Image (spheres, rainbow, N blue to C red):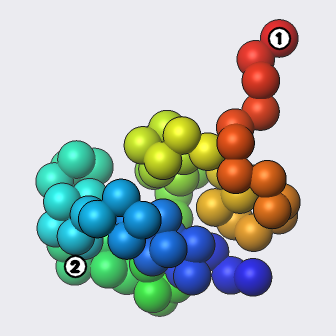
């Protein structure tokens, strides 16, 4: 699974628009659209912000796990 599918899925589950996320992330809607369409790689800092927004792990967004809940802190 590629992360563009997951980004769109998570965004629509929260009923957010690309514009909503771009505003929260302090980037343009066009820039966010490029990440969601995988025409640009997501910077690590932005990936971490998205994981925090969606209360999930970066691995879930990247399709490396099917477990949506974030890892517990030790």
Pick the residue in front: 49 or 54.
54
Q: Name the residue under label 2.
A: 30
Q: In this view, does 45 lie above or below 41?
A: above
Figure quadrant of residue 55: top right
Residue 40 image position (x, y, % from top left) = 47, 79
- For image coordinates 16% across by 67% down, the residue present is 19
Helix, strand or loop status at disc 2: helix
Q: Is residue 40 at least partly visible in the picture?
A: no
Q: Residues within 10 Å of mark 2 (few under 14, many from 20)?
A: few
Residue 38 image position (x, y, % from top left) = 52, 84
Q: In this view, does 36 lie above or below 50?
A: below
| Image quadrant containing the N terminus | bottom right
Pick the residue in front: 61 or 31.
61
| Image quadrant containing the C terminus | top right
Looking at the image, tell me whether mark 2 or mark 1 is earlier in sequence order: 2
Residue 46 image position (x, y, % from top left) = 45, 50
Q: Is residue 59 above or below residue 73?
A: below
Residue 26 image position (x, y, % from top left) = 20, 49
Count of marks, rendered view = 2
Classify residue 65 as left or right of residue 55.
right
Q: Name the residue under label 1.
A: 74
- For image coordinates 16% across by 54% down, the residue present is 23
Classify residue 72 as left or right of residue 57.
right
- For image coordinates 28% across by 49% down, the residue present is 25
Classify residue 24 as left or right of residue 14.
left
Asked whether disc 2 touches disc 1, contact meaning CB atoms under 8 Å apart, the reply is no
Q: In this view, does 35 lie above or below 24?
A: below
């Amino acid at each position: 699974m590629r992360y563009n599918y997951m980004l769109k899925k998570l965004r629509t589950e929260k009923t957010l628009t690309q514009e909503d996320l771009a505003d929260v992330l302090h980037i343009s809607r066009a820039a966010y659209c490029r990440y969601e369409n995988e025409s640009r790689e997501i910077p690590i800092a932005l990936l971490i912000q998205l994981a925090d927004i969606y209360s999930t792990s970066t691995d879930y967004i990247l399709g490396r796990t099917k477990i949506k809940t974030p890892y517990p802190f030790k």
